Image: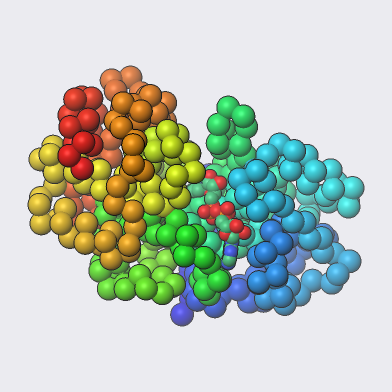
Amino acid sequence: MRETIQISSRYGDYDVIVGRNVLTRKTLHIDCLAKAKKVAIISQKNILELHGEKLLKSLSIPKERLFIRTVQRSEKAKSIETCTRLWQELLKEGFSRDSLIVAFGGGVVGDLAGFVASTLLRGIPWLNIPTTLLAQVDASVGGKTGINVPQGKNLVGAFYPPKRVIVHTAFLDTLSKKELKSGLGEVLKYAIGIDQRVWLKCKRESFKATPSAGLVTACLRAKADVVTKDELEGGLRKILNLGHTLAHAIEGAAPAKMSHGEAVAVGLRYALALAFKHGVASSEYVSEALDLLGKAQLAKRPPSGLTFTKLLPFFAVDKKSEKGGLTWVLPTGPGQCKLVKGLDNNQLAKVYTEF
Ligand code: NAD
């Protein structure tokens, strides 16, 4: 089964091709690849060891046109130093505007390779082939690319969508449990408050094995719908932060204590508790949503010792904190949510302590 999701973007429309086995010569048959005099694969050593052969076979490009560059296997790869190295190496190899970059990896590789593509010679085409669950259901769609700077994560970047995204879900079979869980946090976010199609798929999913291609497709449709309506994060896209206000605060106040997905899961539980307290979510819906989170075996509580007082400064720097107070995304029913402003700190602290 293969599905194509079309994304419209002011920087050029693109297709996301998704299915269990969709990385083929046929799906890679795209103008910018056929015309590319040179092609650079940007990836990580472990990913190439696992899946490089499949990629090379599908690309089938003569050796003299192909350059393979690997980057560090951590957030550290999203740095200006790695960009400088890649810019210089590709320029030395004679890369021009009719060359192509292929990102082959998780969100780190996608964000970095996309940013290098957006800046090299003021922009050269790129393809994104995401290999983690988080990258397949979230990072690969929406056109955001970027790197980290000492002042914070993802603070330098560009909206620069790829020419095509190929989501070959069989790659997920080699992911560690930890990385799968990291992506599941985002999957459950769509189910609980963004899109009813994902809710229905999650109800049928056992979460014991690699997520089905159908579930990944539903998530991609959910994200595509939101980013198509609000490409540059003017408004609607804020709903994608459901569960992330607490998650970012946990990651800020207790770095490395929890994976991103686990922190999002805790954030989703907190958002459900707030929504119930606020009278915008029924007890039946909340308990069904908690059942889904339980089925996925994601974390239930913040790291021990993390009091509300320690989290508070991190809420203030959250990107949804604007004039009139922090905007909370509260889930209101299967695949639905609303934005709520002005929840007072006493109320937030009380729900946090009870939960
Ligand atoms: P990651 O890219 O660091 O990958 C996690 C680990 O999985 C790495 O060690 C990687 O080598 C390994 N891996 C990748 N594919 C594999 C496979 N098929 N089998 C086995 N191992 C594999 O982490 P991530 O969670 O994919 O991405 C996190 C990044 O994504 C962050 O930097 C975040 O800022 C970014 N992000 C971007 C967006 C966006 O819209 N651009 C959205 C969400 C997150």
- Location of residue 201 in the rendering, given as x and y in whole percent from the top left corner: 30, 69
State the residue at coordinates (29%, 23%).
325
State the residue at coordinates (68%, 39%).
79
Query: How did the renderer colour the structure?
Result: rainbow
State the residue at coordinates (50%, 76%).
20
Q: Quadrant of ligand 1?
A: bottom right
Please say if 129 is above or below 120. below
Nearest the viewer among 261 and 331 is: 261
- Location of residue 278 in the rendering, given as x and y in whole percent from the top left corner: 13, 37
- Residue 353, quarter of the rendered image: top left
Nearest the viewer among 151 and 9 is: 151
Task: Using the rendered image of the protein, determine whether residue 91 is visible from the camera's viewpoint.
Answer: yes
| Residue that protrudes farthest toward the bottom in the picture | 1
| Residue that protrudes farthest toward the top in the picture | 323
- Location of residue 26 in the rendering, given as x and y in whole percent from the top left corner: 63, 76
- State left or right for residue 121 relative to residue 197: right
Nearest the viewer among 84 and 263 is: 263
Q: How many numbered marks have been drawn onto this rendered protein structure? A: 0
State the residue at coordinates (78%, 46%).
86
- Location of residue 24 in the rendering, given as x and y in whole percent from the top left corner: 63, 76
Nearest the viewer among 3 and 352 is: 352
Q: Quadrant of the C terminus?
A: top left
- State left or right for residue 26 relative to residue 335: right
Task: Using the rendered image of the protein, determine whether residue 238 is visible from the camera's viewpoint.
Answer: no
Please say if 204 is above or below 310. below
